[in-house]
Structures are given as structure tokens and as C-alpha cells.
Amino acid sequence: MKNILIPILSSIILLSGCRKNDLINADYEISVDETFQVELVSNPTTGYTWKWANGEFTTIVDSINWTYVADAPDLIGSGGKEIWEFRGVQTGIDTVKFEYSQSWDAGSTIDSIYLVIKVN
């Protein structure tokens, strides 16, 4: 029993010194005014594109650029990737949600991605 109790107590002591935010694994960790890019596989010829679904509720980052890069620009219907660029605007931790859908059909979402962002 003593052999089991020591590792458990050690873990509790180590974790008690950590703040809640120190324990969160962020997909992206940046500083205020720093930028990062998110690349999402896409094929807009199908009518589907990525949208930032919770942008109006996210306060720690702002989208500053969006572009599409085709894998084979000379081949009609080829896929590619959407590149979203964000900038940290205030410290905190939040989740950015992307939805892959057709803009004219509210029920057409076929994929969602959640990214945890931490701005120091």
C-alpha cells in the first residue's frame, strides 16, 4: 500500500502547483500579435468550403487572411487546400470551430474541426 501511495501523493503535489490553463494541450500556442496558419483540405468545385463557425464568439484570435490553393490548377475539379491565417489579439484559451459545408444549405455540414488555441 505504501508503494502505491507515494506515486499518487507525488502526482497530487505536482499537479496542485499547476494552474488550470497549464494543463491544457493547445493545438496552437502563440503570443498576442503573433500569427499562425491553418490548412484545410478542400474542393470548392463540389460546392463545399470551410467556414469559421464560431468566429463571432471567439475573442482571442481574429482571421486576417484566407486563400485557396489548388493542387493541380490546370485540372478542373481538382482539390486543394484552404489556408486560414489568424492573429492573436488577446490572452486566453479558446476553441476555433470550422465546418465544411455548402453555404446555401444550412444542413449540409459533412465535417467539423475543433482547434484549441492558447494566446499568451
Image: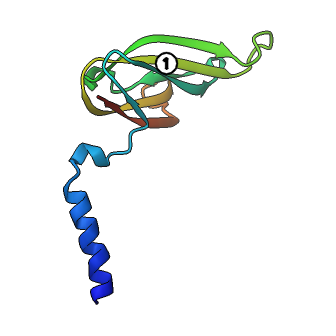
Residue shown at the point (67%, 21%) measured from the top left: 80
**Residue 7's spot in the image, x, y percent?**
31, 74
Q: Is residue 116 left or right of residue 99?
A: left
Q: Is residue 16 shown above or below 65?
A: below
Instruction: Give the mark count.
Output: 1
Q: Is residue 47 visible?
A: no
Residue shown at the point (25%, 22%) measured from the top left: 59
Q: Is residue 108 left or right of residue 61?
A: right
How is the structure coloured here? rainbow
Q: Is residue 11 visible?
A: yes
Q: Is residue 96 left or right of residue 6?
A: right
Q: Which residue is mark 1?
A: 84
2 or 34: which is nearer to us? 2
Residue shown at the point (54%, 18%) measured from the top left: 83
Residue shown at the point (30%, 33%) measured from the top left: 94
**Residue 16's spot in the image, x, y percent?**
19, 58
**Residue 2's spot in the image, x, y percent?**
27, 87
Q: Is residue 74 shown above or below 113?
A: above
Considering every residue shown, the one lying at the far right of the view is: 75
81 or 46: which is nearer to us? 81
